[in-house]
Amino acid sequence: MGAPGIFSSLGDLTNNVRPAPSPSPSPSPSPSPSNDVGQILIDYAAGVPSAASIKRAGFRGVIRYMSEPRASWMIGKPMRASEVQDMKSQGLAIVSCYQFGKGTTSDWRGGYSAGRTHAAKGVSLHNAAGGPSNAVIYAAIDDNPTTAELQLVVSYLQGWESVIGRNRTGVYANYPTIEHLRARGIGSYFWMHNWGSGGRIHPAAHIHQFEIDRQSVDGVGIDRNRILKASYGQW
């Protein structure tokens, strides 16, 4: 998240860590393969644009927060059932994500126990908004973690997987972090941001955030994200 007035949502190698055993897997999320590859999703936190305006602007759908606001200007968090109904009335896709902290308070810094806590909160808000019980929820690694920090990132995401299962665990992260997690079997969906990615797009990424806070819809600053795979956690 950016500071007030900068309406970005989520921002802009290797230790031998083995993932903890996953719980009994949740029903596998199986969004129908789409023709959405190449189309654009938007994410936002400073307000809630109307679905009609989003569709009119040519966007395929939204990536929305299933997390509480960290600051008073984040009036677009969390997504509510009324917004879901508006989006669905326009045939727009929705992707769920969770982020509360940023910088020194980043969610992943709390490790495994924080992952469990945040997963439970994310699921509760996702369910309250009307999200499907088997949908993917992306957890935010809104950073460029050092090699030493990646062990804590892994622990955090193991916490997520212990609550919702690997099949439902998505990760918002940069190229090196995605590479590290893939090598350890952590996460099933990946939304890549550019910070620390060296201009590369990871081949495992399902979504790529390529622009932050340069456009707006209904006066709300948005980030733009390109869909890279037919199934990307949409519901």
Image (spheres, helix red, strand yellow):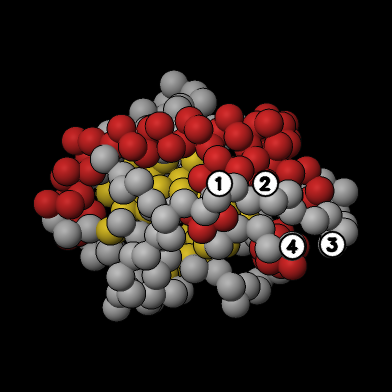
Residue pointed to by mark 2: 158
> Depth-wise, is mark 4 or mark 1 nearer the camera?
4
Disc 4 is placed on an element classified as loop
> Depth-wise, is mark 1 or mark 2 nearer the camera?
2
Q: In front here: 90 or 15? A: 15
Residue name at image x 33 percent, y 74 percent:
33
Q: CA distance from mark 1 to mark 3?
A: 20 Å
Disc 2 is placed on an element classified as helix
Left or right of residue 92, residue 180 in this image: right
- Tell which circle, 3 or 2, labels the residue nearer the N-terminal end: 3
Q: On residue 139, which mark appears?
A: 1
Q: CA distance from mark 1 to mark 2?
A: 11 Å
Q: Please name the amino acid that badge 2 sits on.
A: Gln
- Tell which circle, 1 or 2, labels the residue nearer the N-terminal end: 1
Residue name at image x 39 percent, y 70 percent:
231
Disc 3 is placed on an element classified as loop
Q: Where does the image place residue 9, in percent across and percent down from the top left?
A: 48, 44
Which quadrant: the N terminus? top right
Q: On residue 184, which mark appears?
A: 4
Q: CA distance from mark 2 to mark 4?
A: 11 Å
Q: CA distance from mark 3 to mark 2?
A: 18 Å
Q: Please name the amino acid that badge 3 sits on.
A: Leu
Q: Please name the amino acid that badge 4 sits on.
A: Arg
- Tell which circle, 3 or 4, labels the residue nearer the N-terminal end: 3
Q: Where does the image place residue 101, in percent across and percent down from the top left?
A: 60, 32
Residue name at image x 43 percent, y 60 percent:
28
Q: Residue furthest front?
A: 24
Q: Where does the image place residue 74, in percent across and percent down from the top left?
A: 42, 30
Residue pointed to by mark 3: 13
Q: Please name the amino acid that badge 1 sits on.
A: Ala
